[in-house]
Amino acid sequence: MTLANSMLIPILPLMQRKLKISALQTSLIITIYAGVSIVCIPIAGYLSDRFGRKLVILIGLSIAAIGGVVSSLAVWLMGHSGYWLILAGRFVQGIGAAGAFPIVLPLVGDMFKREEEVSSGLGMIETANTFGKVLSPVLGSALALIIWYMPFAVIPVISAVSILSVAFLVKAPKKKTPEKADQSDRSIRAFAGSLKSLLAEKRWLYAIFAIGGIAMFITFGFLYYLSSVLEDHYGIDGIVKGLLLAIPLSAICAASFITGKIVGENKRRMKVFSVVGLLLLTAAMVLCGLVNTKALWFLLSSMFVSGVGIGLVLPSLDALITEGIEKQERGTITSLYSSARFIGVAAGPLIGSVLTKNETVLFYLFSGCALLCAVLAVWGVKPGKPKPGRSAEPAARAS
């Protein structure tokens, strides 16, 4: 599902010219996908707690495929007059995306019992997610060389392959019958009440929601900025542009993989990695605000450092939030977390399109947001200590 968004980023300037739309309208093609997901992800999480993760993922992927067909046909048959139908297709895709990747996080937590395995698994999932971001600008640029709207057309194909892969390769653990019966009897009101009590008890979740959302806001904001600058200022497009966009994303990918392996079951280590990553991100954004970001080598180096910082943060947050929640509530809570992240995905390109011509303000905004996250990580996230006798499953709950 990462490809459905990130693959379009390198062709946004080209899309703007072909569809004869403004920069703000172009950013809405990304924003509407993420915006509708924000609303639908908690619903998908609740449904996955009641009816199973795998079923919700398959339905979500099917809906995403339908939305992809609508958008691609609108571009192909209607051209620039089909802009609003393209947005409608992206809206449907966003609904489907809500039931896909966000549900994978609690599914990983369900599939493994040992805390170290969960942390490692989440690190690999975050790495796979980021690898999709690394691959997507190159793939999007290459496909656009064939036909400019080809990135829209391949999304239904990718969704179909994903449906088959999940259906035949993912073996989700079965719920015990009493637990299943108990969950089926839960009313929406009872669910909302238990969720409210959980959030009141575990206030550290709010800090993690905020950090995850702001991290994605910065990520997609600077990717939009970088995509625009490479084409408008340097005249770089095509596969070369995709490869340059992949540099910061590669840093996120590598750092996420290594972090997932290192943090293990040590929640204090997760917190330290989060704080260090956010401080790296803050420093890189401050430098971009102080120095001439039109110097390509400096801009790419700063973005690489930013990617490392974000790569230290995301898998640590995934592990903290997944292992700090009981299995029966894990889908809902991780979905709220994913909604917070999608708020950042939606806001990043929007703000980036408005402030592209005023990059100093843009990067100072990013640095201020990153510093705020670092403060939240220090004082808002308080990992608990492991409880004795519970080594076989996630025992050390964040408090």
Image (cartoon, rainbow, N blue to C red):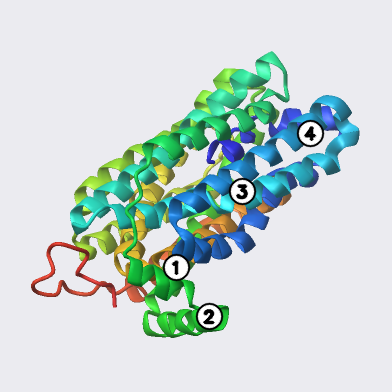
Picture coordinates of residue 7 (x, y %)? 59, 33
Q: Nearer the viewer, mark 4 or mark 3?
A: 3
Callouts 2 and 1 close, C-beta under 8 Å: no
Residue 192 - label: 2
Q: Nearer the viewer, mark 2 or mark 1?
A: 2
- Give me the C-alpha separation between circle 3 and circle 1: 19 Å
Closer to the chain start, of discs 2 and 3, is: 3
Picture coordinates of residue 72 (x, y %)? 74, 31
The three-letter code of the residue at mark 3 reads Gly
**Identity of the residue furthest to the left in this view:** 389
Q: Which residue is mark 1?
A: 333
Q: Nearer the viewer, mark 2 or mark 4?
A: 2
The residue at the point 31 percent across, 58 percent down is: 319
The kind of secondary structure element at disc 1 is: helix
- Give me the C-alpha separation between circle 4 and circle 3: 25 Å
Local packing at callout 2 (Cα closer than 10 Å; few below 14, some 14-19, many 20+) is few
Local packing at callout 3 (Cα closer than 10 Å; few below 14, some 14-19, many 20+) is many
Q: Which residue is mark 3?
A: 96
The three-letter code of the residue at mark 1 reads Ile
Closer to the chain start, of discs 2 and 4, is: 4
Picture coordinates of residue 209 (x, y %)? 47, 67
- Give me the C-alpha separation between circle 2 and circle 1: 12 Å
The three-letter code of the residue at mark 2 reads Ala
